[in-house]
Amino acid sequence: MVETVATDKAPKALGPYSQALKTGGFIFTSGQIPINPATDSIEAVTIEDQTRQVIENLKNVLEAAGSSLSKVVKTTVFIKDMGDFAALNGVYSEMFGETRPARSCVEVARLPKDVKVEIECVASA
């Protein structure tokens, strides 16, 4: 059985996909970008602030699915400039705390709405 996860505490999908799906004891999120769901706009400018908003969006999706950041087992980070890697890691480490999920990080040419970072994750339910 596959359950669709949706919350108004995270940005609405920009296309034909779900914020997350819950199946087999796991939650698979779609990539989150730094859209503030309260205003439906991108307010964060720096990589630090964009990363913070992205992880806050992921946290809200996971909570809507009955999970949390502490249950994340894998993330995939898409970053526009690998020169921002250290700054991203600082916020990432702060927000995930003692949780250290497996992770991939790749530099990409472009992201939706020309943001600096997008993150998706897999968490246990």
Image (cartoon, rainbow, N blue to C red):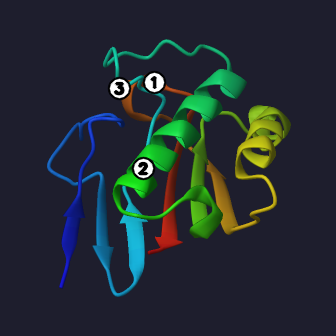
Left or right of 35 in this view: 2: left
Disc 3 versus disc 1: distance between alpha carbons? Answer: 17 Å
Q: Amino acid at mark 1?
A: Asp
**In front: label 3 or label 2:** 3
- 44 versus 20 height, above or below: above
Rendered-image quadrant of the N terminus: bottom left
Q: Position of residue 92 (x, y in %)?
A: 73, 45
- Crowdedness near tag 1: few (<14), some (14–19) or many (≥20) residues, C-alpha within 10 Å: few
Q: Residues within 10 Å of mark 3 (few under 14, many from 20)?
A: some
Q: Which mark is residue 114?
A: 1
Q: Residue at the location (40% across, 70% down)?
A: 27
> Who is closer to the viewer here, 56 or 46?
56
Res 37 → quadrant: top left
* SS category of the residue bearing label 1: helix
* Separation (CA) of disc 3 from disc 2: 14 Å
- Relative to 104, does residue 6 appear above or below in the rendering? above
Q: Nearer the viewer, mark 3 or mark 1?
A: 3
Checking the image for residue 37, the label placed there is 3
State if disc 2 and disc 1 touch (CB < 8 Å): no
- In the image, what residue type sits under mark 3? Pro
Q: Is residue 106 left or right of residue 86?
A: left
Q: Residue placed at 40% from the left, 64% from the top?
A: 66
Residue 31 is labelled as: 2
**Where does the image place residue 98, in percent across and percent down from the top left?**
81, 60
Quadrant assignment, res 81? top right
- Which quadrant does the C terminus fall into? bottom left
Type of the residue with mark 2: Gly
Q: Identify the secondary structure beneath mark 3.
A: loop
| Whole-percent x, y for residue 58 in the image | 48, 47
Q: Is 95 on the left-hand or right-hand side of 25?
A: right
